[in-house]
Amino acid sequence: MKKTMLALMLSALAGTAAAQSNVTVYGIVDMAVVRESGGVGAAASATKLTSGVESGSRLGFKGTEDLGNGLSAIFLLENGFQADTGAMGQGGLLFGRQAYVGLQSKTAGTLTLGRQYTPQYLAVAAVDPFGSGTAGDTKNLMASTGNSASRMDNAVKYASPVVNGFSAEVVYGAGEVAGDSTAQRQFGGALAYTNGPLVVRLAHHNRNNNTATLKNTSSAKNTVLTALYDFGVAKAHFAYGVDKGLNSALPRNLNNPFGYAVAPTPTTDSNVVLLGVTVPQGVGTWLASYIRKNDKTSFNQDAEQLAAGYRYNLSKRTDLYAVYAYIRNKNGAGYTVGSAIEGGTGNRGLNLGIRHIF
C-alpha cells in the first residue's frame, strides 16, 4: 500500500514538474561504512553499511506559485528512505522528513503549515561543524526537540524577513489530544542576527508532557544560544544550551547500551557547551568539535564528546567523508555515538562514506 501511494504521488508530482518550471525535484543519497563499539551485547560492536549517516537520504519536491504583488504560494514534500535496503524512513511515513504548504511574502515574511523542523533544532544544526550528522552529530549530547527527531507535527510557523541583519521565527504545534487542548502542545521561536562573518541565534522550545496517563507534569524546556564566525581561514562554532524538565534531554539510546546494573537516569536539568572548528583546505574541509554535557541533577551523569573528521569534495554535489567520535560517560551516564538518523549502540563510532546531492 505504501509503495502504491508513493508511486502515485511521484507520478502526479512528476507531471506537475513537467508542466510548471517552478517545481523542483531534489534529493540526497548518502551511504557509509559504520563501525560502532564500546557498548555491551551482541549488537554493541558492529560493522555495517548504513544509509543517511552524514545527511539523511531523501527525495523531495518543492515549488512556488506567483500570486502577484510579491506574494507566492509555496509547498515542500520530503520523503526519507534507507538507501541500503530501500525501506521508508521515519517509521514508514510517506513524507516523514517534512510536509508543509504556505504563503511567502517578500515584505511580510513566510507562513507555513504542516510537519516542520523546530527553530531550536535549526539553530543547533546551523552551528554544528558536522551539520547534525555523522559520528560527530550534536544530537548525541545536545537535546533534540519536537516530537519526532527535531520535527513538529501539526505545526504553524512564521518566519520574518531580514531587517537590518535581524530575523525571527515562531512556531506553534497543536497536541491534538482529545479532551485536553494543552496536552502535547508545543511552541518555540528563534531570533537571529547576521553581520558579515558573524551569525548569532537565540532559540527556545517548549513541549507540554501531559497525556491521558501522564498528568500535571512539567514541560520540557530547551534554550540555546549559538554563534558562528567566519575568519576566512577557519570558522569558529559555539553553542550553549540549557535543558529543563521531564523529557527535555533524552539519550538517543534508551536501552541501557552499556549494561549498567542501574540503567542511566535521563537528566531533567542540564547545560551543554559546544566548541567547534572547520578549516577549509583545498577541495576538502577539516572538522572538529568538543561537547560537554553537565547533568545538574543529583545523579551527576555528565558526558563529554570529542569528534574529528575530514570531508573531501569530489564536485559541488558529491563528497567523501571520514569521521570518528568518542564519548566519555561519567557516573553511569549512557550516551552513545550515533549519526544523522541513528542513535548508536556504544561510545565510539567511525564513519567512512559518500554523499551525493541532486
Image: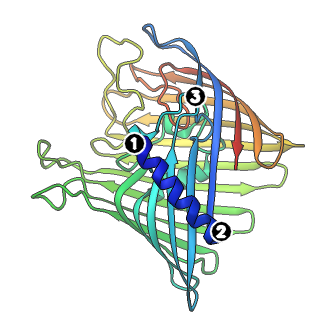
Using residue 91 as the reference point, say whether residue 165 is left or right of it: right
Considering every residue shown, the one lying at the far bottom of the view is 69
For discs 2 and 1, the disc positioned in front in the rendered view:
1
Distance from disc 2 to disc 3, alpha carbons, whole Å, reads: 39 Å
Residue type, mark 3 in image: Asp
Residue type beneath disc 1: Lys
Q: Position of residue 14 (x, y in %)?
A: 58, 59
**From what the image shows, is residue 280 above or below residue 122?**
above
The answer, for residue 101, to whether it is visible in the render is yes
The residue at which mark 1 appears reads as 2
Q: Residues within 10 Å of mark 2 (few under 14, many from 20)?
A: some
At horizontal 56% and vertical 86% (from top left) the residue drawn is: 107
Q: Earlier in the sequence, mark 1 or mark 3?
A: 1
Contact? badges 2 and 3 (CB < 8 Å):
no
Quadrant in the picture for residue 249: top left
Circle nearer the N terminus (2, 3): 3
Q: Residues within 10 Å of mark 3 (few under 14, many from 20)?
A: some
Q: Locate residue 22: give its quadrant.
A: bottom right
Return the residue nearer the eye: 62 or 275: 62
**Percent position of residue 195, x then y:** 70, 70
Res 194 label = 2
Q: Residue at x 69, y 62 (%)?
A: 198
Label 1 crowd bin: few (<14), some (14–19), many (20+), radius 10 Å: few
Residue 96 visible here: no
The residue identified by callout 3 is: 84
The amino acid type, in three-letter code, at marker 2 is: Thr
Q: Earlier in the sequence, mark 2 or mark 1?
A: 1
Q: Residue furthest right?
A: 282
15 displayed left or right of 176: right
